[in-house]
Image (cartoon, rainbow, N blue to C red):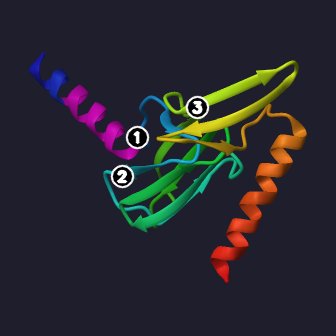
Amino acid sequence: MHARHRILSALVAAVALAGPTLAGPLSVEANKTEPLRFKRPVASVVIGNPLVADIAIFNEQMVFVTGKSYGTTNLMAFDAAGNLVYSNDVAVSSPTESLLRVVRGDAINSYDCTPACRSIMNPGDAQGYFDSVLDQNRQLARAARE
């Protein structure tokens, strides 16, 4: 009986070490970054939909995941031999504590209120409002590059 238990334990350990790390989905708020540490070194990392989340590689055992737009995508990491080391969903949510949405008829405007309210783009916002905030963000990005 003990021999069977040791063999079963060894098989379970081998499968756990060989397979990808699986846990609940990685949760990230839109426009925020979360570190993700791997148990072993990885050589490449792939994000399913770069419109939902993005990755920045810090080193072979840590990346940063940035939420870009609301939704769910997946992230996979591979070692140098091409073995899957990590696979998980990435769920990007809206900021809950600081988000203020003003509804006027069928028009919605979004604001980030930490500590003072400022206009932000949010899916579902009124088109004119969204375009105006987008244009302002582009102008700020241009000014920052100059």
Residue 124: x %, y % from top left: 80, 31
Question: What residue would you read off at disc 2?
Answer: 38
Q: CA distance from mark 3 to mark 1?
A: 33 Å
Front-most of residues 53 and 117: 117
Q: Determine whether the residue tagged by mark 1 lies in a helix, strand or loop.
A: loop
Q: Is residue 53 above or below residue 106?
A: below
Q: Earlier in the sequence, mark 2 or mark 1?
A: 1
Let me know if residue 42 appears in the view: yes
| Quarter of image, res 144 | bottom right
Q: Earlier in the sequence, mark 2 or mark 3?
A: 2
Q: Residue at x 38, y 45 (%)?
A: 18
Question: What residue would you read off at disc 1?
Answer: 21
- Look at the numbered discs 2 and 1 and tell me whether their residues touch, using CB distance below 8 Å: yes
Residue 64: x %, y % from top left: 46, 56
Q: Is residue 81 above or below residue 32?
A: below
Question: What residue would you read off at disc 3?
Answer: 99
Which quadrant: the C terminus? bottom right
Question: Is residue 145 located in the magenta-colored stretch of the structure?
Answer: no
Question: Is residue 14 located in the magenta-colored stretch of the structure?
Answer: yes
Q: Residue at x 68, y 44 (%)?
A: 120
Outermost residue on the bottom side: it is 146
Q: Determine whether the residue tagged by mark 3 lies in a helix, strand or loop.
A: strand
